[in-house]
Amino acid sequence: MAFAQERTTDSFSRQIYFKKMYTLLDTTYKDNAKHMAFIVNEIGRILEDPQMGISKISVVSSASPDGYQERNEKYANERAESISNIIVGRYPQTKDLFEVKSLGIDWDGAIRVVEESDVKYKEEVLKILREYPVQQQKNGKMSYPRIDNLRRLRGGIPYRWLTENSFKELRKTVVVVYFWKEIPAPEPPKKDTVVTPPVEPVVEPEPVVEPVIEPLPQPVIAVKTNFLYDFGATPNISVEIPLGKKWSVAAEYTFPWWVWKDNSRAWQILYWDLSARRWLGNRDKKDVLSGWFVGLTGGAGYYDIEPHRSLPHRGWQGWFWTGSLEGGYAFWLNDRWSMEFSVAAGYLGTDYSKYKGVMEDEHLVWQHDSHRHYFGPTKANASIVYHIYRKGDKKKRQQLREQRRHENENN
């Protein structure tokens, strides 16, 4: 016999703190590693239980009075987004469950921490916090009486003390997860039966938490040049776009168009190349566009080559096309630059016309047409690569790298 189920609701919360002017999760600061890991693991446990579900995830972020309102609103917003992105990155199905709010400067919290502090001139500080306006417009200009007077009070002595001691408690993001659980309704007792008293629930220990590591932002496009070709008077440029961490696509354009010595020598090539690459190894531990790779590449182009090796001057004009397998390795030099080395081998075909130059190469005289097929090495590549990020990702990447270096030094 089936019974209706009851649904109970509950919630849990944790606070994540930030250093001054920081907007990213710093797992070395206070108990952030433990608290963030608890949030992520508990959300995972709820999502895996078919009898449980999450109704809302509230993320409320605030800043301290360490600057003007607009800048601190920006910091608070970015802190809330940083924590939300970590959770969504781990559990994409929670994306629509978030309620994100930024308080800007937490003035009420500032009053509370000052009341609980041992700061000098406490009453004067509290008078400014309670009575002075946050901002006001005068003569067409915006002023900030509360923060300006707080900074100037007693030569800035109480403000500096509060910044280093009490106000750091206000730079935080509070995460509250609201969830529900379905519980089968108890079967009604039968008549003339003894009802067994309920057994006291066993309190389960807090689950073991695992550290949470925020992934480094990755570039969205890379621009590069093969300097082996550049040194050979063959300028070129290519762009590569990562498709996740395992795949990328690239396009290359080679464009030498030189003529020397009164048309007696030509080195002219226009070549377009497309390639797809598969990046090997454990991609969770590597940046995009780094490590070993294999790929397919193909292209086509036009050429006019007159080497001026003998008289009369001879040259070749024609179209060519290639299809190759390539393999190589790339490594990062810093957060903007990397190096890439590769070789390719496959097929090259060409249809061309042979000519000779007459009357000091003022005229090209056709000799004959022909075509060739070639199997073997088709390309050697040693490129310098420049990586382009989304707006703000470069700064975030540098900050996360600094945090990880600090963690490694402490461990």
Image: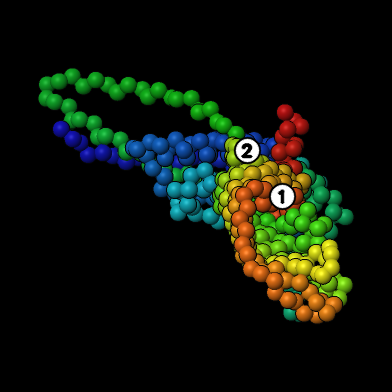
Q: Position of residue 407 (x, y in %)?
A: 72, 34
- Give the secondary structure at mark 1: strand
Q: Nearer the viewer, residue 146 or 190?
A: 190
* Residue that label 1 marks: 380
Number of numbered labels in the structure image: 2
**What residue do we see at 52% from left, 39% from top?**
40
**What residue do we see at 74% from left, 37% from top?**
405
Q: Nearer the viewer, residue 114 or 385?
A: 385
Q: Earlier along the polypeptide chain: callout 2 or callout 1? A: 2
Q: Position of residue 77 (x, y in %)?
A: 62, 57
Q: Is residue 182 above or below residue 295?
A: above
Q: Nearer the viewer, residue 202 or 34?
A: 34
Tell me: 268 left or right of 175.
right
Q: Residues within 10 Å of mark 1 (few under 14, many from 20)?
A: some
**What residue do we see at 72% from left, 71% from top?**
355
Amino acid carrying label 2: it is Lys
Q: Is residue 69 visible?
A: no
Q: Position of residue 303 (x, y in %)?
A: 70, 67
Q: Is residue 201 visible?
A: yes
* Residue that label 2 marks: 285
**In the image, farthest residue toward the left:** 191
Tell me: 92 left or right of 69.
left
Residue 149 location, quadrant: bottom right
Q: Position of residue 154 (x, y in %)?
A: 86, 54
Amino acid carrying label 1: it is Ala
Quadrant of the image for the C terminus? top right
User: Distance between the Cα atoms at labels 2 and 1?
Assistant: 28 Å
Q: Nearer the viewer, residue 187 or 154?
A: 187
**What residue do we see at 76% from left, 72% from top?**
356
Residue 32 location, quadrant: top right
